[in-house]
Structures are given as C-alpha cells and as structure tokens.
Amino acid sequence: MSSKHLQISHENAVLRITLARPEVRNAFSEEAIAALTAAFAEAGARADVRAVVLAAQGPAFCAGADLNWMRRMADYTREENLQDAAKLAEMLRVMHECPKPTIARVQGDVYAGGMGLVAACDMAVAVDTAGFCLSEVKLGLIPATISPYVVRAMGARVAQRYFLTAERFGAAEALRIGFVHEVVRAEALDAKVDELLAALRGTGPDAVRACKKLLRDVCGREIDARLIATTVQGIADIRASGEGREGVQSFLNKRQPAWLRT
C-alpha cells in the first residue's frame, strides 16, 4: 500500500506509516490525506496489527498544507472549501478513532495541520530539537478542523495562547503542556518508541480497543447518572468477555495470558 506519499511496513504486529515527501517537508495534499485515511482505516481493521507508528522522512515531521494545494484552495468556492475541509476532518477522525493504539514518532518540526496529525495519535514522542507551531492565523486562517484534537492534547487554556499568537515553541514546552509525552535526543527516538511498543504488546488487544472507546466516551463529559451507567456497562461487558475472563484467570493462576503466548 506504499505510495509516493507514504511508506508502509508491517513487522512484529506493528504497522509503520511514514510520511514520505521530505522534499516538501511532508506537507499534505488531497492525495496524501486520502492515503493517510485509507492507511489508518486498514490498520484498524487488520487482526495482525497491534499498534501503529506514524513517522516521517527528512528533517521535518509535517509542515501542514502543501503549497500547490494551498494555491488551488485560494480559488475554491465556499462549497468546494466545505468538501475539501471535510476530507481533512475525516482523516483526523479515522486516525483518532483507530481501534489500535497509535504513536506519533516526531523527528522534526511540526506546523499547522501537522499538529493535528500528532494530536490525533494516542501517544507522541519527539526529539528535543523539534519545533511546534499553530501558524494558521498568520495566514488569516484558523486551525478549525484540527482544533478538537489539539485542544484535547494541550488543553483549552494553553490552546488560547498558541492558537491566537501563532508562536513557535520547542519540544520542552510541548512536553510541559502535555502535547507530547516524551522528549528525547535524536539517537534515542527509536528506542523510546520501541519501549512504548513493548508495553503495548503486554496488553490485552480487546481491552486496549475498549479503553480507546472509553476515553472518547468519558472525555469532557459531566459525571452524571448517564456517564456512570456507561462506565458500569463497560466494565461488565469486558469482565464477561473471553479476553477479560482469560486475563483474570491467568492473573489468579500466575500464568501468562493467551495473548502473550501467541
């Protein structure tokens, strides 16, 4: 499924999706958006995939929109802009709702729409030299389609600053505000990603899928009777499932669960 926009590999139950246009700083276009949407949809459906790593080639992770795409957008009607933005929004939704855990491997700068790619992943590891910027207002635009994911990742109060000022900030600040989970030197990047993958391999695949849904269900919700009922149903369902029963029995009997023996 690799293309001129993406390189895709599968090994040891990990699907690696790599942005492969370093000559344009991995900026995305209509074609790249379609390719990413399809790649994450396929990853979510594959039984032989336990985790997904989103990476990039070259010095930049993603510079946002491709310049040629932006030139075309400048002449779009409002209806054409609606259709175009909907495709970007669908890509981010598919990434965010991928039932497999996802890790952004950030080896370089992240700008504008690229911030949405990182925020839509479950985890993010960045090199200490990476820079981050929500640059849209400098172009008279707003980070609309990426905003639900970026605000969840860094919090509303922090987003108020960086959405409005378009300031560039470094990896240490990205870590402080929670936008990334780990910051490491370039030579340690793959080791840190592998560390997270090792942790994920020890988890129950169905439990991870259910946890991702749980997070979407409870995030930002008022703690009321309806939410409590949802959580009660969630734990009851997973306890009664085959994987849940196997996990508890293996713990009580001091043996490895079945998913670690396959």
Image: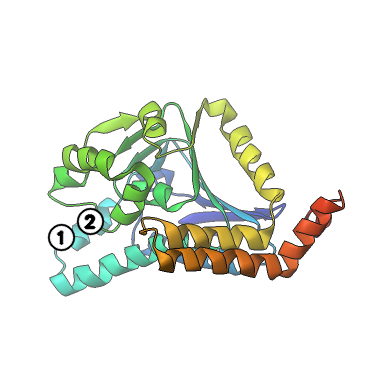
Q: Residue at x 17, y 41 (%)?
A: 164
Q: Secondary structure at mark 1?
A: loop
Residue pushed farthest bottom?
79
Q: Position of residue 11 (x, y in %)?
A: 70, 52
Image disc number at residue 70: 2
Indicate how the structure is coloured in the image.
rainbow
Q: Tell me the number on the disc at residue 74.
A: 1
In percent of width and height, residue 185 lies at 52, 25
Quadrant of the snapshot with the N terminus: bottom right
Structural crowding at the residue carrying mark 1, measured as other residues with C-alpha within 10 Å and reported as few (<14), some (14–19) or many (≥20): few
| Secondary structure found at label 2 | helix
Looking at the image, which residue is at 70% across and 70% down?
240
> Which numbered dot is residue 189?
none
Amino acid residing under circle 1: Ala
The residue at 29%/46% (across/down) is 112
Q: Quadrant of residue 157?
A: top left
Q: On screen, 134 above or below 43?
A: above
Would residue 38 be visible to someone looking at this image? no
For the residues bearing labels 2 and 1, Cβ distance under 8 angstroms = yes
Q: Position of residue 179 (x, y in %)?
A: 39, 40
Crowding at dot 2, Cα within 10 Å, few <14 / some 14-19 / many 20+, comes out as few
Residue 118 vs residue 219, the one in the foreground: 219
Q: Is residue 163 left or right of residue 50?
A: left
The alpha-carbon separation of the residues under discs 2 and 1 comes to 6 Å
Q: Furthest-front residue in view?
A: 225
| Residue 104 percent coordinates (x, y) | 49, 45
Query: Which amino acid lies under the numbered mark 2 shown in the image of this protein?
Result: Met
